[in-house]
Image: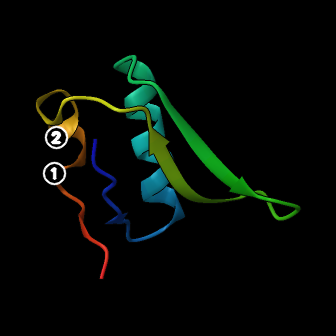
């Protein structure tokens, strides 16, 4: 298994990705910072790269 950190442009992009993942039945968790309720990251359970790369290909590695 590998851990990969990708960068999203903004909160809206994260929420759109979460909706897409939910529609495609990809197990994930949208992390919301409290008490502001701001989406800051998405975590996916381990998947083969081929299964999730189509949803994540527009995101770049975080540097």
Residue reaching furthest to the top: 25
Closer to the camera in the image, 57 or 1: 1
Circle 2: element type:
helix
Residue drawn at x 34%, y 19% as measured from the top left = 24
Please state if 63 lies on the left or on the right of 39 as rendered: left
Q: CA distance from mark 1 to mark 2?
A: 6 Å
- What residue do we see at 45% from left, 25% from top? 27
Residue at the spot x=38%, y=66% of the render? Answer: 8
Pick the residue in front: 21 or 16. 21
- Vertical arrangement, residue 14 with respect to residue 9, above or below: above
| Vertical position of residue 29 compared to residue 58: above or below | above
* The furthest residue to the front: 1
The quarter of the picture where residue 34 lies is: bottom right
Which residue does the numbered mark 1 point to in the structure image?
A: 57
Q: In front here: 1 or 31?
A: 1
Image quadrant where residue 44 sits? top left
Lateral position of residue 58 relative to residue 39, left or right: left
- Which label number is shown at residue 20? none
Quarter-wise, where is residue 16 in the image? top left
Q: State which quarter of the image contains the N terminus.
A: top left
Residue closest to the far right: 35
Extreme residue toward the bottom, this view: 63
Residue 63: x and y, percent?
A: 30, 83
Q: How many marks?
A: 2
Location of residue 35 in the rendering, given as x and y in whole percent from the top left corner: 88, 62
User: 17 left or right of 48?
Assistant: right
Q: Residues within 10 Å of mark 1 (few under 14, many from 20)?
A: few
Q: Position of residue 42 (x, y in %)?
A: 49, 49
Residue matched to label 2: 53
Residue 5 x %, y %: 35, 63
Are the residues flagged by discs 1 and 2 in contact, CB closer than 8 Å? Answer: yes
């Amino acid at each position: 298994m590998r851990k990969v950190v990708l960068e999203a442009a903004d909160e809206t992009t994260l929420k759109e990705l979460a909706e897409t993942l939910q529609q495609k039945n990809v197990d994930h968790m949208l992390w919301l910072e409290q008490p502001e309720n701001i989406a800051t990251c998405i975590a996916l359970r381990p998947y083969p790269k081929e299964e999730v790369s189509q949803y994540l290909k527009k995101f770049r590695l975080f540097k």
